[in-house]
Image: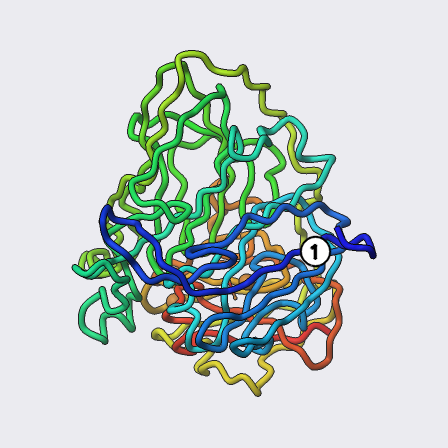
Amino acid sequence: IDEDGRKRFDLTMQEGTSEFLPGQETATWGVNGAYLGPTMRLERGDDVAMNVTNDLPETSTLHWHGMRVPAAMDGGPHQQIEPGQAWSPEWTVDQPAASLWYHPHLHGATAEHVYRGVAGMIIVEDDDVTEGLPNDYGVDDLPLLVQDRSFRSDGELDLNATGPLWMQATYGLMGDQILVNGTHDPYFEVESERVRLRVLNGSNTRSMNFGFDDDRAFQLVGTDTGLLPAPVELDRIRLSPGERAEIVVDFDPGDDVVLRSYAPKQAGSFAEDRLAGADDEFDILRLTAAGELTPGEPIPAELATTPEITPPEDATERVFTLGGTAHINGASMDMSRIDEVVPAGATEIWTIENPSVVHNFHIHDVAFRVLDIDGVEPPPELTGRKDTVYVAPNTSVRIAVEFGEHVDPEAPYMYHCHLLEHEDQGMMGQFLVV
Ligand code: C2O
Ligand code: CU
Ligand code: CU
């Protein structure tokens, strides 16, 4: 807290060395450390002052994914930080409790910068709705930043892991090793009966489908940008890159279970499933429970008090067609072109059509609700507040988008596919809020 009462964070993007695989050194990038960055805890109402220094050898940016911020503070492709320079955005947190994250967003280099390790989580708390859920950080409330990576035989990150260039361009950089919070082969010793996991798929391009190896059920309590109105019981939750899920899991003394990613499917054809990793399965995190556990409180039957996002009768509708791996509505990202202009505070209906390969869709500065997928009501895990949604090949997803109130006639926000190689290839557009 500084003298003006602002919560101040000094973040330095830097180079470092990590040991993920035993005896192997890997050159990595991180924030205030060699790989990834600190989890930041913010409360609704906080005045935040960031100071981001770029000690990397390249220009980069730092974007607050899921955060409602003025466009000039968003850390998108326009807020570049040159090597040796600093950038100091400020804003007031005003949004419901959620698990957000931060990562670079330099156009054309986002995939590489994230892959090297620049990312971290942000926890937003909001008094009236956080009570009753496990919230003892690192004890019964854990962020899980899950990423796939590939390593060369000399231990270095393999930036060409997917094979021929056309394949990498289409399916992105997919790794065959899993890191959780920057740890390979991780485990966690559970000490409470009830644990909240804030799961983020921080992979560049790989979708994951999380569940436990004993198929135990868990309660989904939150999605990207907020808690659900009530917990939803599930045994699998699919997250495409950038999506988050807060789940609460119950343990018995002595339990020994593995959180896994099961075949995420839905990539399309048989061949497409192979290439897009839709058949791949991984162990994510082993959880072993102590012989005696701290009793957990029951999960509240009602969670979020935020009203459901509801478009007005005469809502503006827009259609976005994802084409190939580099276009939206036939155009590739142009930093000097504004694609859409949205009135501040509007709730609009956006339709995302995908006649092509695996994609998802993310919008900055908003929360949205999935209205339907190919005209069918979404499953319960997609009914909450979100900022990123999976769009399977040959489907169309309709969302009700709640835009923010920060007006700027010049600085745009982004919408894009969050498969980072696609984003870098130009599958991104810009909108102004006026
Ligand atoms: Cu997570 Cu435009 O980004
Ligand atoms: Cu974002
Ligand atoms: Cu895509």
Q: Nearer the viewer, residue 306 or 59?
A: 59
Residue 25, by quadrant, is bottom left
* Element marked by disc 1: strand
Q: Where's residue 322, x and y in %?
A: 42, 71
* Dot 1 amino acid type: Arg
Q: Nearer the viewer, residue 17 or 248?
A: 17
Relative to 270, say whether 322 is above or below.
below
Q: Where's residue 93, x and y in %?
A: 72, 53
Residue 375 seen anywhere in this rendered image of the structure: no
Q: Nearer the viewer, residue 94 or 18?
A: 18
Q: Quadrant of ligand 2?
A: bottom right
Residue corresponding to mark 1:
8
Q: Where's residue 250, x and y in %?
A: 46, 22
Residue 406, by quadrant, is bottom right
Q: Is residue 209 left or right of residue 31?
A: left
Q: Is residue 356 left or right of residue 130?
A: left
Q: Where's residue 68, x and y in %?
A: 67, 59
Q: Residue furthest top?
A: 292
Residue 146 seen anywhere in this rendered image of the structure: yes
